[in-house]
Amino acid sequence: MNTSAEAEFSAGPDDTVVGQAIHWLMRLQSGQASPSDWQAFRDWREARTDHAVAWERLQGIQARFTELPAQPTRTVLENARKDVTRRRAMRTLGVVLGGGVVLWLVRAQAPADSLLASYGTGVGEQLRVALDDGSMLVLGSSTRADVRFDANERRILLRQGRVMATTGADADVAQSRPFFIETGHGRVRALGTRFSVSLGADGSEVQVFEDAVRIRPAAGTATRTLEAGQRAWFDAQGVHDAGPLEADADAWADGLLVAREMKLSDLVAELAPYRRGRLACDADVAELRISGVFSLTDTDRTLSLVEKTLPVRVATATRYWVTLKARAPR
């Protein structure tokens, strides 16, 4: 039996339209949607009846654990940046996004050769950092990263977790410096791009969303270039397991998880880093499939939604020991 939130779309809009609705939800919740984006969304929604139906049904799913922001948050961020420029100081702005809070850290301008800053997040937290060169970083849950810029290069040292980078033009220096994200397994050089790097015990994963990157493993001399829409895993010896990105792979940067017929065990694996303690599911429910848009920053609500959608129950030994088990037949 196919039991999922996507079942609410049965006898309604086709998969393409549902995918478009999910895209608009992601865009409008990103905190970076412009007024023209909002107008384009309204035009799309009003263009066809099935667009409006898909949106209303998706909103019905989404409303179980979160709400859209009342208006674009980009203007708020831009105003904060203007305030930072005037005051020449650090300001922290909390932006409500989805079911949780994403922190926007805006750093005042400083000489590039003096920039040596460390950033970190706790369990379930995310952090957005605007850097002096115009780049933007998003740190995921339980992440530690050092920003090390000098006259020759821009380097992000990822010590734990995962980070998304959107590289800036580096316009305030005479010659643009290369931009790297470095882990213990090697270096990833941005070729004018948006990409993420996740650090694991045995290797690092790279996902490319715009343009391209070049990977150089720590112990090797050969490099590997990944284009937009590709991902790969690498260790110190080489690049492995290259392939296409999954749809909405960057949703985590907005505090969301988009699942399309995802196995429950995989969904649990995605949620686990955003919770303290142990989160698991029993083997007899691990293969159940689920679709929907879920919050990473409010995992209790997400688990409640899963419990309402699938024939499972959330068994809590303590608040730090949670297991999804099969629901007893009624």
Image (spheres, rainbow, N blue to C red):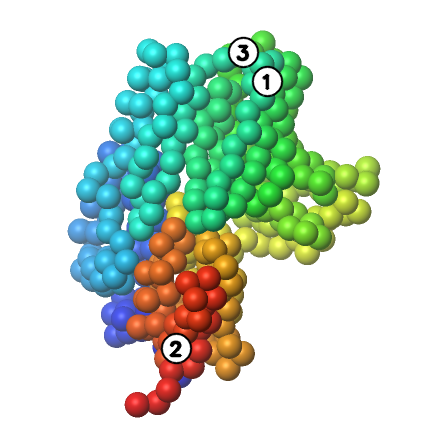
Q: Point out the tag, 1 or 3, that comes first from the N-terminus.
A: 3
As helix, strand or loop, the secondary structure at mark 2 comes to strand
Q: CA distance from mark 3 to mark 2?
A: 55 Å
Q: Point out the tag, 1 or 2, that comes first from the N-terminus.
A: 1
Query: What's the residue at 27%, 29% (across, down)?
Result: 76
Query: What's the residue at 34%, 43% (across, down)?
Result: 101
Label 2, on which residue?
Answer: 312
Q: Is residue 24 visible?
A: no
Front-most of 181 and 17? 181
From this view, report whether residue 215 is shown above or below residue 12.
above
Front-most of 131 and 260? 131
Q: Point out the tag, 3 or 2, that comes first from the N-terminus.
A: 3
Q: Is residue 28 left or right of residue 191?
A: left
Front-most of 95 and 72? 95
User: Label for residue 111?
Assistant: 3
From this view, report whether residue 129 is shown above or below residue 292.
above
Whole-percent x and y of residue 72? 25, 37
Q: CA distance from mark 1 to mark 3?
A: 15 Å
Locate residue 32: give its quadrant: top left
Circles 1, 3 touching at the beta carbon (< 8 Å): no
As helix, strand or loop, the secondary structure at mark 1 comes to loop
Whole-percent x and y of residue 305? 32, 66
